[in-house]
């Protein structure tokens, strides 16, 4: 089966392409490289022996999408393409809504015209906002989002819900990722943020490799066991496998399917620092700083639905997430 992978050159998309090829699924990638590099294709080839078909272009380009659907018999689409930096989204909401919301609408319209009815969408636990009760289930209320990035994900979810109602033959799967971290165990592929990393794990990795002096820990006065923020970190290889499980189990079943992809375990910032120090063999320097605006105290997933209906369960531990990130970062100190 051929699957169109939008944003397939990015962090999660590239790992998913590798796992798809291992499973005999043929990815066809469209990516405008606004947050990734063409070198990713070579790494996919090194890991799998296959160089996926790659279209360098934008999902908002209707003609390009029509051409891709015309040139390949696409069975499903996995839609990773989008902008994802929370802070940047506050400064550039227009670009975020245009890319994430309008981009998705152009894509779905092209799918409709081409008669492709299976879509898996990269959503985020951010759609849940700051819920009172943990763990978060798929029926926890959504929409209390605090920034344009989160709102764009929520808006896309709502649009897709309406589209699926109007075109009932569509199979639409919303995968709500918790905190993706880690790298391919080979050390050849990983996260390569441009500029100063926004997220915890790539920041720690850059401190470990000497690119940054110390980690700023944003707040140690949260109502959590050690006072630092708690998140559900999930290994990117587990996440990649979650997409394949979704394609196989519900990708051909008409309806709207929603799953949390997490481990069900929360870890604090200081626990992540500890795991990374162990992986790299020396202490990661950090300073306690004020809370970051918009952050919540804690967040972790109830994964029962994905475990039962997708037959999928995250396997990797926090220690493995740190080891694999360190292997990637130390082998590629400046990224790709
Ligand atoms: P990423 O930036 O590494 O990958 C996204 C890819 O999409 C990049 O290669 C980029 O060049 C491409 N892209 C962006 N806009 C495009 C457009 N208009 N047309 C074509 N290509 C375009 O990000 P990622 O971490 O791999 O995330 C993938 C998806 O998962 C995103 O939609 C993101 O919002 C979502 N997500 C990520 C996280 C996370 O922490 N990484 C958490 C929850 C959800
Ligand atoms: N964090 C931190 N320092 C950093 C980046 C993040 O202390 O440089 C904390 C942040 O406050 C949160 C956790 O690490 O408690 C995860 O943040 P991240 O940005 O990786 O993911 P989020 O859950 O906010 O999307």
Image (spheres, rainbow, N blue to C red):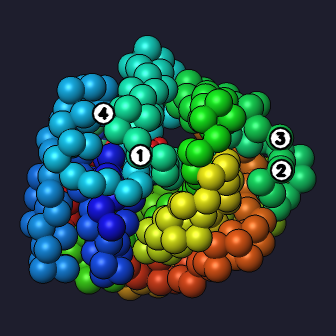
Mark 4 close to ligand 1, CB under 8 Å: yes
Q: Residue furthest right?
A: 133
Q: Which residue is drawn at the image coordinates 27% and 25% (left, top)? A: 62
Q: Is residue 238 visible?
A: yes
Q: Nearer the viewer, mark 2 or mark 1?
A: 1
Determine whether the residue tagged by mark 4 lies in a helix, strand or loop.
loop
Mark 1 C-beta to ligand 1 under 8 Å: no
Between the C-alphas of marks 4 and 3, the distance is: 30 Å
Mark 1 or 3: in front is 1
Q: Which residue is mark 1?
A: 116
Would you say the beta carbon of the disc 3 residue lies within 8 angstroms of ligand 2? no
Q: Which residue is mark 3?
A: 141
**Residue 259 spot, x, y in % from top left:** 67, 58
Q: What is the distance, in whole Å, between disc 4 and disc 2 at their CAs? A: 30 Å
Disc 2 CB within 8 Å of nearest ligand 1 atom: no
Tell me whether the residue at label 4 lies in contact with that at label 3, contact meaning CB atoms closer than 8 angstroms.
no
Work out whether 102 lies above or below 132: above
**Picture layout, residue 46 above or below residue 152:** below
114, 181: nearer the viewer: 114
Q: Is the Cβ of the residue at disc 1 closer than 8 Å to that at disc 3?
A: no
Residue 236 in percent (x, y) is at 45, 68
**10 Å crowding of disc 2: few (<14), some (14-19), many (20+):** few
Disc 2 or 1, which lies upstream in sequence?
A: 1
Reading the image, the residue beneath label 4 is 59
Q: Looking at the image, tell me whether mark 1 or mark 4 is earlier in sequence order.
A: 4
Q: Residues within 10 Å of mark 1 (few under 14, many from 20)?
A: many
The disc at residue 139 is: 2
Occupied quadrant, residue 177? bottom right
């Amino acid at each position: 089966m051929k699957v169109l992978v939008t944003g397939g050159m990015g962090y999660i998309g590239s790992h998913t392409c590798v796992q798809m090829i291992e499973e005999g699924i043929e990815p066809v990638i469209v990516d405008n490289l606004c947050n990734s590099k063409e070198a990713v294709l070579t790494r996919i080839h090194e890991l799998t022996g296959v160089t996926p078909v790659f279209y360098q272009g934008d999902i908002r380009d209707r003609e390009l999408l029509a051409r891709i659907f015309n040139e390949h018999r696409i069975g499903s689409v996995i839609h990773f393409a989008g902008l994802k930096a929370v802070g940047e989204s506050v400064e550039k909401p227009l670009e975020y809504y245009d890319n994430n919301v309008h981009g998705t609408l152009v894509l779905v319209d092209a799918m409709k015209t081409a008669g492709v009815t299976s879509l898996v969408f990269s959503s985020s636990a951010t759609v849940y906002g700051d819920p009172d009760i943990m763990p978060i289930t798929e029926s926890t209320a959504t929409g209390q989002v605090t920034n344009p990035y989160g709102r764009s994900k929520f808006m896309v979810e709502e649009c897709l819900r309406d589209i699926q109602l109007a075109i009932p033959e569509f199979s639409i799967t919303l995968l709500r990722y918790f905190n993706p971290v880690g790298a391919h165990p080979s050390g050849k592929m990983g996260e390569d943020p441009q500029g100063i990393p926004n997220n915890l794990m790539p920041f720690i990795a850059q401190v470990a490799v000497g690119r940054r002096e110390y980690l700023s820990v944003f707040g140690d006065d949260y109502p959590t066991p050690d006072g630092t923020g708690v998140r559900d970190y999930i290994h990117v290889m587990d996440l990649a496998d979650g997409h394949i499980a979704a394609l196989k189990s519900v990708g051909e079943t008409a309806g709207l399917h929603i799953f949390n992809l997490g481990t069900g375990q929360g870890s604090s910032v200081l626990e992540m620092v500890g795991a990374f120090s162990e992986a790299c063999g020396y202490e990661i320097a950090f300073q306690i700083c004020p809370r970051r605006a918009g952050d919540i105290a804690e967040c972790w997933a109830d994964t029962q639905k994905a475990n039962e209906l997708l037959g999928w369960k995250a396997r990797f531990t926090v220690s493995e997430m740190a080891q694999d990130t360190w292997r990637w970062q130390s082998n590629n100190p400046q990224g790709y």
